[in-house]
Image: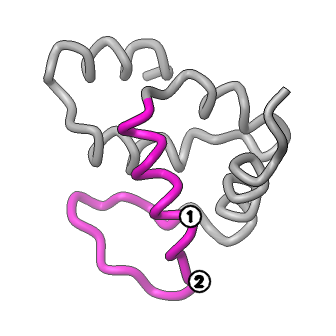
Amino acid sequence: MNIHDLLKRYDKGQVTALHLMTIVINLVDESNADSILSALPAEVLAHVRDFATCYEPGPKISIGGVPDPGPERVKCIRLWFDAPAT
């Protein structure tokens, strides 16, 4: 499933912002975070930012088997938020 399909489901109310965030953090390409993150609505971006801000490496408790994105991907997400807008 790609980001556009997920956004369609979000727009239809089939996926919550929090659920979409848990999927999206694992879709982010470390070499091009903008390709995913720039497509997200503000509500979802707020969840992604909160997650990246609070993230600490180590074992996680996950509902539904969402994999840990890992510190490298989270660092990439943090850098995307910290980058100046162009």
* Comes first in the chain, label 1 or label 2: 1
Q: Residue furthest left?
A: 13
Identified at 72% across, 31% down, the residue is 34
Image quadrant assignment for residue 13 = top left
Spot the residue most to the bottom: 58
| Quadrant for the C terminus in the image | top right
Q: Residue at image x 49%, y 28%?
A: 40
Task: Provide residue 7's location: percent of width, then percent of height.
Answer: 37, 19
Q: Amino acid at mark 2?
A: Pro
Query: Position of 43 compared to 13: left or right?
Result: right
Residue 36 sits inside the magenta stretch: no
Q: Amino acid at mark 1?
A: Ala
Look at the image and give the residue range highlighted in magenta: 42-68
- Could you tell me which residue is drawn at 62 percent across and 68 percent down? 70
Q: Where, by quadrant of the figure, is residue 82 drawn?
A: bottom right
In front: 71, or 13? 13
Question: Where does label 1 land, which residue?
Answer: 52
Q: Residue furthest front?
A: 85
Q: Residue at x 46, y 62 (%)?
A: 50
State the residue position of label 2.
57
Name the one closer to the observer, 48 or 14.
48
Crowding near pointer 2: few (<14 within 10 Å), some, many (20+)?
A: few
In percent of width and height, residue 15 lies at: 21, 31
